[in-house]
Image: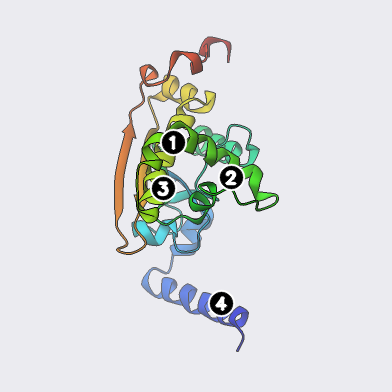
Amino acid sequence: MNPYEKLLLQNKAWSEEKVQVDKHFFSRLAGQQKPKFLWIGCSDSRVPANEITGTDPGEIFVHRNIANMVVHTDLNMLSVLQYAVEILKVEHVIVCGHYGCGGIEAALTNKSFGLINKWLRNIKEVYKMYQGEVEAIESHIEKVNRLVELNVMEQCQDLIKTSIIQKAWKERGAPEIHGWVYGLKDGRVKELTTIKADPESVNPIFRYNLDEL
């Protein structure tokens, strides 16, 4: 049996198990989704949102990309964000990085990776902001992990710079923004930051005149 066929068999076993536990599980999911959380995570296959948080399908709306970035020109991420915030009305947005992130490690080098260089450029901008702090760390692993943390916190800041978040804050006082880092070695999440729905949290340069929206 090849790996692809194994996936199909595992899917069948999983669906049958779900129905045995709750015969209305899939009919309920098909009817609607009302997640309270938007997860912006890394594409790394070892960091699955539902398994990490012990949640079922339907509880977390998910967007993933290399190094869990919030790039202001990324229409994919912005479309997910707008749908989650304005249509699904999520109450929390979680940016979750992970220690040992390959994208972060790549951004610390001067290697050329082709097309991905354009994406890594966004991480390098964070590296530049904290260059002194990062380069003062002797251990390469600790250097990578510290930039992982700094990157998560900067992505949270980039979220609150969007008109999507600022508009939702004005209209319904939500969502809260959370920055997490996941440990591959122990499976535990470390909370780095929480930003409440407060316009004063946004640097005045990035505040929008919401009356014009």
Q: Name the residue that disc number 4 marks.
A: 7
- For discs 3 and 2, the disc positioned in front in the rendered view: 2
Neighbour tally class for label 1: few under 14, some 14-19, many 20 plus, Cα within 10 Å: some
In front of the other: 43 or 85: 43
Q: Which mark is residue 131?
A: 1
Q: Is residue 10 above or below residue 41?
A: below
Helix, strand or loop at label 1? It is: helix
Residue plotted at (44% across, 63% down)? 25
- For discs 4 and 3, the disc positioned in front in the rendered view: 3
Q: Is residue 43 above or below residue 203?
A: below
Residue 200 point in image, percent of width and height: 36, 16
Residue plotted at (56% across, 38% down)? 122
CA gap between label 3 and label 1 equals 22 Å
Residue plotted at (44% across, 72% down)? 19
Q: Name the residue that disc number 3 marks.
A: 96
Helix, strand or loop at label 2? It is: helix
Neighbour tally class for label 3: few under 14, some 14-19, many 20 plus, Cα within 10 Å: many
Residue 197 point in image, percent of width and height: 36, 25
Mark 2 or mark 4, earlier in chain: 4
Q: Quadrant of the C terminus?
A: top right
Q: Quadrant of the N terminus?
A: bottom right
Going by the numbered disc 4, the residue's amino acid type is Leu
- For discs 1 and 2, the disc positioned in front in the rendered view: 1
Going by the numbered disc 3, the residue's amino acid type is Cys
Mark 4 or mark 3, earlier in chain: 4
Helix, strand or loop at label 3? It is: strand
Q: Name the residue that disc number 2 marks.
A: 120
Would residue 31 be found to the left or right of residue 93 on screen? right
Q: Are marks 2 and 4 in contact (CB under 8 Å)?
A: no
